[in-house]
Image: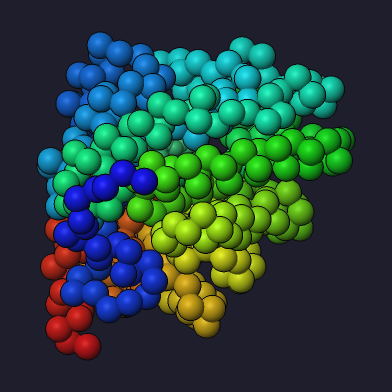
Amino acid sequence: MTDFPSLKNDLLIRAAYCEEVERTPVWAMRQAGRYLKEFQEVRAKHDFFTVCRTPELACEVTLQPLRRFDLDAAIIFSDILVIPQALGMEVQMVPGKGPVFPKPLIHPNEIKALNQDPDIDKELGYVFDAITLTRKKLEGKVPLIGFSGAPWTLMAYMVEGGSSATFSKARAWLFQYPEESELLLNLLTNTIIKYLVNQVKAGAQTLQVFESHAGILGSSTFAKFSLQYLSRIASGVKKELSDLGISRVPLIVFAKGAHYALEELSATDYDVISLDWTIDPKRAREISSAKGKALQGNLDPAVLYGSPDSINCATKRMVEAFGARGHIANLGHGMYPDLKPESLKAFVDTVHSASQECIKNS
Ligand SMILES: Cc1c2[nH]c(c1CCC(=O)O)Cc1[nH]c(c(CCC(=O)O)c1C)Cc1[nH]c(c(CCC(=O)O)c1C)Cc1[nH]c(c(CCC(=O)O)c1C)C2
């Protein structure tokens, strides 16, 4: 592994392992993106996947939010849909519409046509190069987070062909073709484990798995088609890293909308459970703390449309409700493209001041 500058701010790592901190670490999902004019300038010149595939550009947009805000982590700029691409599917990013698969999976026969054993270093080497470059450029300022989409969320896009409110075609597969769905979910799981391990080899210091579409499944469907794969990813990545003699990194799982499965998620090998805003922090603590898990989240991103005072107030309330140990402050989902950058600044600064106050008084 490459020699990297040593980490100066390890708040996120300590919080993930429920160790003592002087203040609560904070970052924001989608902290890089269209709400920043410097990001729009890059996007005006380069299409979305060119930014992902060009390490210098991916590194630049990863660092943009860190120049503006006092963030405690960087997240590598990429997308969850690079995995379906590595399996041989075409994905386009259509302005105003989001991701589009010109040839989605219509029938399970088509699973056979996917690349069954992709050469991850060849197909996704550009992500690893972007991680290594960014880790160097960060000069140890804050940890670099790597990530992947989770199997069910990726399957949902591969079958649906793009975004959807209900993902009804993808959900139909789970009942029409349960065995073939499991075949696809297994292929994705095996690919994701290799992808995440290679991100750590390239320099990622924390990993997050995004199950963004957990909330459209019921609890029994989630248990069958999501949870077991999420769980295998955490134990698989940990085992592989340990077999390779590589130090552990914190693993975060974000299963958006899966409030019904908090107890089950807390029983997996993830170190941190990331919450959306529909879960009450105190209730989440009762369920997860017994299992020694840290929590991440969970301010409703819509709060950032409010006045500076109301952002301050809601953020303070959130910091106090979680308490200072084992908490990584974040939004309950990503930044929206029309939010003002100053609102994120108000959130970040309030997390730092309110958590320091909280620790002083405890
Ligand atoms: C900024 C951006 C990204 N992806 C997309 C955009 C906007 C497109 C553009 O610039 O034109 C398309 C892009 N890619 C995707 C979408 C969502 C489509 C939908 O709503 O269904 C869009 C607009 C799919 C996607 N992509 C991602 C998720 C999981 C997180 C979530 O739930 O929001 C999902 C679901 C992950 C993702 N995607 C991205 C990051 C960057 C790192 C950071 O957080 O700063 C990350 C972590 C970057």
Quadrant of the rendered structure where residue 47 is?
top left
Residue 307 visible in the current orientation:
no
The answer to whether residue 99 is seen in the rendering is yes
Look at the picture and state if 144 lies above or below 311. Answer: above
- Name above or below for residue 64 compared with residue 25: above
Q: Position of residue 46 (x, y in %)?
A: 30, 13
Q: How is the image coloured?
A: rainbow
Specify whether 70 is left or right of 197: left
Give coordinates of residue 59: x percent, y percent: 26, 32
Residue 269 x/y as whole percent? 57, 65
The C terminus: image quadrant: bottom left
Residue lying at the far bottom of the rendered structure = 362
Q: Is residue 242 above or below residue 362?
A: above
User: Residue 311 or 149: which is nearer the viewer?
Assistant: 149
User: How many callouts does the rendering have?
Assistant: 0
Specify the quarter for ligand 1.
top left
* Residue located 71% across and 23% down the image: 114
- Judge from the rendering whether residue 264 lies leftward or rightward of residue 322; answer left or right: right
| Residue 183, x across and y down, in percent | 79, 38
Residue at left 25%, top 11%?
Answer: 45
Q: Residue at x 26, y 24 (%)?
A: 57
